[in-house]
Every structure is written in structure tokens, then in C-alpha cells.
Image (cartoon, rainbow, N blue to C red):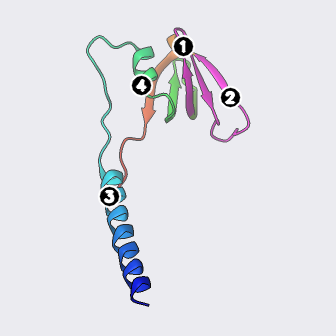
Amino acid sequence: MRAWTRLFMVMVVASGIAATASLTAFAEEKKLDIRQADTMGDVLGRMTGSPVDLTLRSGASLSGKLAKVHQNIAVLSELRGKEFYDAVVRIDDISAVTVRMRDR
């Protein structure tokens, strides 16, 4: 019976440590990595896999997960409001990128 009690206590302590570590990592603020010689393609390339909002020169906006970035195009998947659709956007047509960097 003592072995089970000891095992239970070890599991409780281990789960508490894991929860604290994950909260600390979650609370860290991300930084937008912009370098002096960056192009829009360079910045987008570092955001691959992140949810983004793209504002186009026309004023239209597309929101989704940045799936791929090539030399002249970016691929958005899981478009907001059109989750079954993807979009291909010319990088030259993007005037702004909005990305969530922090939580409350």
C-alpha cells in the first residue's frame, strides 16, 4: 500500500511541474522577427505555419494559416469563414500582414 501512495505522490508532483513549465512557456511573449534587409517574402517565410491576416493592395483581407511561401506566392489554408478552401496570393499584392503575437 505504501508503494502506491508514493507513486501517487510522485505523479502529482511531476504533473505540477509539467503544468508550471507549460504555463511559463505559454506566458512568454513572441517577437516579430524583422531584419533590415527583409522582403515581404522573407517575413512570410518565417511565419509559415502560423495563423495570419493578409491585407492586399486592393483593400481585401484574407485570414488563414500560412501554409507555404514560395518566391512569388504565398499559400493560405483553412481560410477563416471558408475552412474547406485554400488561397494562393501573389506576395507583391500583400500590403500588410497581421499576426497574433501575445495573449492577455
Question: Which of marks 3 and 1 precedes in the sequence?
Answer: 3
Q: Which quarter of the figure is the C terminus placed in?
A: bottom left
Q: Secondary structure at mark 3?
A: helix
Amino acid at pointer 1 = His
Nearer to us: label 2 or label 3: 3
Q: Residue at label 1?
A: 70
Mark 2 vs mark 4, CA separation in Å? 19 Å
Q: Amino acid at mark 2?
A: Asp
Mark 2 Cα shell of 10 Å, populated few (<14), some (14-19), many (≥20): some
Front position among marks 3 and 4: 3
Point out residue 84 in the picture as x, y percentages from the top left corner.
73, 37
Which quadrant is home to the N terminus? Answer: bottom left
* Residue stretch rendered in magenta on the structure: 65-89
At a point 50% along the width and 18% down the height, the residue shown is 94
Q: Residue tagged by mark 3?
A: 21
Which quadrant would residue 32 be assigned to in this image? top left
Q: Are marks 2 and 4 in contact (CB under 8 Å)?
A: no
**Residue 72 included in the magenta stretch of the image:** yes
Quickly name the residue at label 2: 86
Which of pointers 2 and 1 lies earlier in the amino acid sequence? 1
Dot 3, how many residues are within 10 Å of its Cα: few (below 14), some (14-19), or many (20+)?
Answer: few
Quarter where residue 61 is shown: top right
Q: Give the mark, 2 or 4, whose residue is nearer the N terminus.
A: 4
Mark 2 and 1 residues: CB-CB less than 8 Å, in contact?
Answer: no
Q: Please report the residue visible at 32 percent of the width from the left and 58 percent of the height from the top.
A: 21
Residue 2 image offset from top left, x and y in percent: 39, 88
Residue 35 point in image, percent of width and height: 28, 18
Question: Which element type, helix, strand or loop, lies under badge 2?
Answer: loop
Kindly identify the amino acid type of the residue bearing the numbered disc 4: Arg
Q: Tell which tag, 1 or 3, sits nearer the viewer.
A: 3
CA gap, disc 3 and disc 4: 25 Å
Q: Residue at x 60, y 28 (%)?
A: 76
